[in-house]
Amino acid sequence: MNHTGKTLASGSLLALLLTTGCAITQEPARVDEDFGNSVRNMVDAQIYNPAAAQNPPVNPPLALDGQKGQNALEAYRKDVAKPKKVEEQIQINVGTGRR
């Protein structure tokens, strides 16, 4: 078989495989009926008092202790403003195989 024949045969085989792949239909994966309920249940379990929004206190605190507020704000700014640096370099090798 000459070069043109091999190319034609390879092209035909490729076209056959591609059309066969398109002909196979699969049902899309069905999502469980309770999808997301585990997350909602976890969030609900973390709420200290679920009825607090419906029953607000008669005399809510109107101010925060100045020193406690300043400490909380400084701790927040210190941790959030400086993300950790990646210490190790990531190496990706592409095309390193031998022929």
Image (cartoon, rainbow, N blue to C red):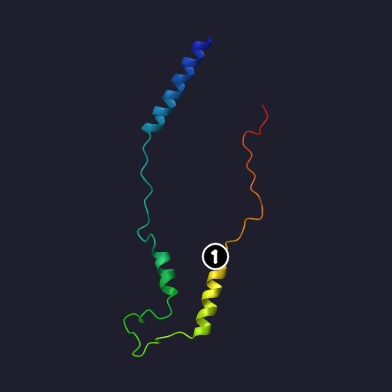
Horizontal side of residue 59 vs 84, given as left or right: left
Res. 60 image quadrant: bottom left
Q: Residue at x 65, y 44 (%)?
A: 91
Residue at the spot of label 1: 81
Q: Which residue occupies the foreground of this view, 2 or 83?
A: 83
Between residue 20 and residue 82, name the one nearer to us.
82
Question: Residue lying furthest left in this view?
Answer: 54
Is 6 rendered above or below residue 29? above
User: Is residue 13 depicted above or below 26 in this figure?
Assistant: above
The percent coordinates of residue 74 (x first, y second) are: 55, 74
In the image, 29 versus 86, the foreground residue is 86
Q: Quadrant of residue 98?
A: top right
Q: Would you say 2 lies left or right of 63 here?
A: right
Please state the total of marks drawn on the protein image.
1
For the question of whether residue 39 can be seen, the reply is: yes
Q: Residue 1: tell me if it is visible.
A: no
Q: Is residue 75 left or right of residue 13?
A: right
Task: Identify the residue at horizontal 42%, vertical 70% (top origin).
Answer: 43
Vertical placement of residue 77 versus 16, above or below: below
Image height of 46 relative to 4, above or below: below
The amino acid beneath tag 1 is Ala
Residue 79, horizontal then vertical, whole percent? 56, 68
